[in-house]
Image: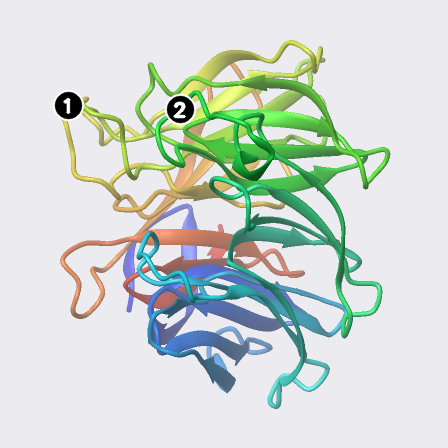
């Protein structure tokens, strides 16, 4: 399946069920799928023009396994209730651990059980995750040690005051609007998106006792939940800058335009300052259905060019060299997948060759090259 490309070239396509996340390690792609019974597909991309399925893992109905991370031959996938929000007191999820030293034959080696796990990152030793835990309202921050992948052990946690209902805390928000969505580690800091609670920056010098440094909650007045917060690993015009993605789903009430990308000055990390944003040219400001605007930027920032999965607008490459005026420099609009009504670009990553992988939540994985 081709599409409309500007500054990018399609080098390969793999037909598969819709995915929530894609990661490539040692030229093997791992895709976490958005609907059961599809769990995880493992794909050989040594020849990107001819990707080849090596194996797949199925999951039971009522189970979501749409996130996957791989380091050093260990694959972690999430287990969450499906559909998200369905009431089932008996459901247990968490993380499933596989030995993928032989990708064609993944071997289950452990489970880290909890009520459920949404997004997480894995650095080869620690997981920084967003589990649902008994006694807490909504997902919290958890740090889990995988030194022995067969016996993972939680070593630290943090929650927004008001979440620990078992401890007598009372939330100042509605339902689970304030909940951990995605912790990401850079050095001794965790940058944590907190859905309709904005984002927080945590000091993790002591992994067992994360400490709040600062945070910013802009929802409301802005209607979208915060999906990802990640600092740029180099200075931009002498300033430390963080990218923040608001996800174009479950907006607050009112006629709203689709979500966009924020740039936040964290030179003084105790006082984060939003100073710029980027919205795609196609938007005219009128209300659009959910899943039209921004979803997720690439979690590995290699240069000032940032690949972004922009739901119904495909892949956008945005240059932030001038952080006050981000600009689109390349794009790829896939063809609408078979059986779908529109494009739903959901996640994007690089491989070691600089190739870009774009997964659609409806169907298909594109492999692209910047030209």
By what rule are the colours in the image chosen? rainbow
Quadrant assignment, res 104 = bottom right
Is residue 59 shown left or right of residue 180? left
Q: Secondary structure at mark 2?
A: loop
**Residue depicted at 81% across the width and 41% down the height:** 208
Residue 189 vertical position relative to residue 44 in the rendered view, above or below = above
Camera-side residue of 10 and 177: 177
Image coords of residue 259 (percent x, y):
32, 30
Is residue 14 shown left or right of residue 126? left
Disc 2 versus disc 1: distance between alpha carbons? 21 Å
On-image quarter of the N terminus: bottom left
**Residue depicted at 51% across the width and 58% down the height:** 115
State whether residue 192 appears in this view: yes
Image coords of residue 196 (percent x, y):
41, 28
Image coords of residue 218 (percent x, y):
42, 17
Image coords of residue 110 (percent x, y):
68, 76
* Residue picked out by circle 2: 173
* Residue picked out by circle 1: 255
């Amino acid at each position: 399946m081709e599409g409309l490309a500007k500054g990018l070239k399609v080098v390969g396509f793999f037909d598969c069920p819709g995915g929530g996340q894609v990661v490539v390690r040692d030229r093997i792609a791992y895709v976490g799928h958005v609907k059961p019974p599809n769990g995880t597909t493992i794909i050989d991309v040594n020849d990107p023009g001819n990707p080849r399925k090596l194996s797949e893992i199925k999951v039971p109905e009522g189970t979501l396994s749409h996130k996957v991370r791989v380091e050093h031959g260990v694959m972690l996938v999430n287990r969450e209730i499906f559909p998200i929000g369905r009431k089932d007191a008996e459901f247990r999820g968490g993380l499933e651990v596989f030995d993928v030293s032989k990708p064609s034959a993944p071997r289950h080696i452990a489970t880290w059980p909890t009520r459920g796990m949404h997004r997480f990152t894995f650095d080869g030793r620690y997981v920084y995750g967003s589990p649902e835990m008994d006694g807490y309202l909504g997902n919290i921050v958890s740090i889990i040690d995988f030194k022995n992948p067969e016996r993972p052990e939680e070593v630290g946690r943090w929650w927004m005051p008001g979440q620990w209902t078992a401890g007598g805390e009372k939330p100042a928000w509605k339902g689970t609007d304030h909940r951990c969505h995605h912790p990401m580690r850079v050095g001794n800091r965790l940058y944590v998106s907190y859905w309709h609670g904005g984002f927080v920056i945590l000091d993790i010098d002591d992994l067992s006792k994360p400490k709040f440094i600062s945070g910013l909650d802009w929802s409301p007045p802005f209607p979208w939940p915060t999906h990802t917060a990640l600092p740029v690993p180099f200075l931009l015009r002498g300033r430390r800058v963080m990218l923040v993605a608001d996800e174009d789903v479950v907006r607050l009430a009112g006629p709203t335009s689709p979500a966009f990308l924020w740039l936040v000055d964290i030179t003084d990390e105790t006082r984060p300052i939003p100073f710029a944003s980027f919205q795609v040219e196609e938007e005219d400001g009128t209300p659009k259905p959910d899943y039209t605007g921004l979803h997720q930027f690439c979690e590995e920032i290699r240069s000032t060019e940032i690949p972004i999965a922009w739901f119904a607008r495909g892949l956008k490459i945005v240059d932030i060299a001038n952080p006050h005026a981000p600009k689109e420099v390349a794009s790829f609009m896939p063809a609408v997948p078979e059986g779908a009504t529109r494009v739903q670009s959901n996640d994007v990553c690089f491989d070691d060759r600089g190739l870009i992988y774009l997964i659609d939540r409806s169907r298909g994985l594109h492999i692209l090259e910047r030209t």
